[in-house]
Image: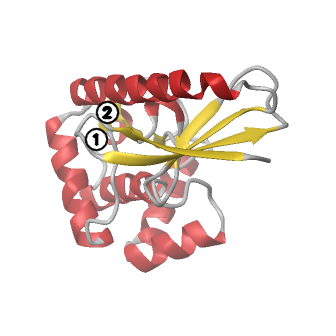
Amino acid sequence: MSEYRSNLTNPQGKTIPVIIRRDKRLKKTLRWAPEPDGSILVRVPLRYPKRQFKGLLRDVETQLAKQKKKSKGRTEAGLQTRAEEINRQYFRGGLSWEAIRWVDNMSTRLGSCTSGGSTDGHIRISAKIKDWPDWVVDYVIAHELAHRKHPRHGKIFWDYMHAHFPRTEEARGFIKGVGYALGKKGKED
C-alpha cells in the first residue's frame, strides 16, 4: 500500500500530520480517524486519484471544524467537569475527548465512546445511572475515557483500567448485581 503525507490545520490553528493510505479493502468510500500520536490516518480506495488528495484534505479539515462546533453544543458542563476531574485524578490528565453528555436512549449499555469519523471522541453516558453511587458513575465515565487510549476491550484495556481506576472490579460487581436484580445482563459500554 502506498502512502502520501501532508498536514492540515485543526480549528485551534494547530498543524496536524496526515497520512493518506491506499487500502485495497475499500471500494468506494474512504475512512479517516485520529491516531494515538495525534496524526490523522485517511484510508482511501486503491484506485482513488492522487489529484483529489488536496480536496480530500480540505474535506477532512472542514469535518474537524464541524465536529468541534457540534461537540461544544453537546457537552454538558457538569458532566464535563466531572470527566476532567476523573481524567486528572486517575489518568494524570492524559486523555482527551470532544464531548460528553447524558443520554436517555441507551437500553442496555451504560456508556459509549466513538472512535474515528466525524463524531470521534464523543462520549455518551446513560441517564439511567445518574442516581447510582458516585464511585460507580465515576467508573463508567473512566471506562469510556479509557477507550480514548484503548478503543477495544481486551487484556491491554483491562490492565489499563485496573492500573488507573482502583475500584474497577468493585464497580463491575455492582453493575453485574444491578443487572441480576433486574433480570438482565447489563453491558458496560
Q: Position of residue 120 (x, y in %)?
A: 46, 38
Of residues 89 and 177, which is closer to you in this image? 89
- Residue position marked by numbered label 2 in the rendering: 102
Q: Which residue is at a point 38% across and 30% down the rendered structure image?
A: 64
Within-10-Å neighbours for mark 1: few <14, some 14–19, many 20+:
few
Query: What is the tally of numbered marks visible in this picture?
Result: 2
Where 54 sits versus 112, above or below? above
Q: Residues within 10 Å of mark 2 (few under 14, many from 20)?
A: some
Inspect this view and state whether residue 104 appears. no
Determine the secondary structure under disc 1.
Answer: loop
Residue 66 position in % (x across, y down): 34, 22
Q: Residue 130 bears which disc, if any?
A: 1
Image position, residue 137 (x, y; %):
32, 52
Q: At label 1, which amino acid type do we have?
A: Lys
Residue 10 visible at all: yes
Residue 113 falls left or right of residue 19: left
Residue 88 to residue 136: above or below: below
Q: Position of residue 185 (x, y in %)?
A: 62, 46
- The structure residue drawn at horizontal position 54% and vertical position 41%, both measured from the top left corner, is 33
Name the kind of residue labelled 2 in the image. Answer: Trp
N-term-proximal mark, 2 vs 1: 2
> Which one is in front, 43 or 86?
43
Q: Quadrant of residue 13?
A: top left
Q: Secondary structure at mark 2?
A: strand
Question: Residue shown at 35%/52% (left/top)?
Answer: 141
Which mark is on residue 113?
none
Q: Nearer the viewer, residue 117 or 109?
A: 117
108 displayed left or right of 47: left
Q: Are marks 2 and 1 in contact (CB under 8 Å)?
A: yes
